Image (cartoon, rainbow, N blue to C red):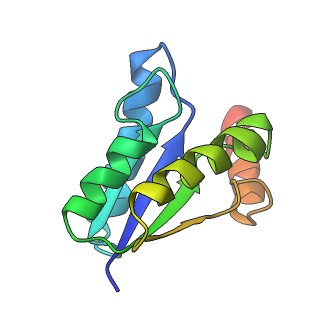
Amino acid sequence: MSTGIVVFAHGSRIASANDAVRTITADLKSTGAFEYVEAAFLELGHPDLAEAVARLVGRGARRIVVIPYFLTLGTHLERDLPALVKGIAQLYPKVEIAVTPPLDGHPALLQILLDRAAAAEK
């Protein structure tokens, strides 16, 4: 089954913040692990989730995995994202849409904190 990945971020009025999401998304795609990869934004960025899913489905994805580029679970992930996914799923009844947990709890976060602390010591 062709899987599409959406890196889903909040979005910002600061263009460089949105560009950073697009960059990490491009980096993910460049690994070659997934053929179909798109960035999407809840607000203040483009494309939104519906457009990103439409792009992926248009290229042949039949399963979409939404990875929230959020550190912790909050209102947007508990309320807004499920509502968006439900509406989008109705548009594509033959496409499976799954959502992963946010970044919080991933073991790599501890190493990131250690790296940042060590860099500040220099």
On-image quarter of the N terminus:
bottom left
For image coordinates 22% across by 71% down, the residue present is: 60
**85 w.r.t. 29: above or below:** above
In the image, 91: left or right of 111?
A: left
Between residue 11 and residue 19, name the one nearer to us. 11
Residue 51 position within the rendered picture, expressed as x and y whole percent measured from the top left: 33, 42
Residue 64 position within the rendered picture, expressed as x and y whole percent measured from the top left: 44, 66
On-image quarter of the C terminus:
top right
Between residue 39 and residue 58, name the one nearer to us. 58
In the image, 5: left or right of 30?
A: right
Between residue 38 and residue 53, name the one nearer to us. 53
For image coordinates 39% across by 74% down, the residue present is: 94
Residue 37 position within the rendered picture, expressed as x and y whole percent measured from the top left: 33, 59
Q: Is residue 23 visible?
A: no
For image coordinates 49% across by 59% down, the residue present is: 89
Q: Residue furthest top?
A: 13
Q: Residue furthest left?
A: 59
Between residue 61 and residue 114, name the one nearer to us. 61
Quadrant housing residue 59: bottom left
**119 w.r.t. 111: above or below:** above
Q: How many marks?
A: 0
Q: Is residue 3 visible?
A: yes
Residue 48 position within the rendered picture, expressed as x and y whole percent measured from the top left: 41, 36
For image coordinates 47% across by 52% down, the residue present is: 88
In the image, 69: left or right of 50?
A: right
Q: Residue furthest bottom?
A: 1
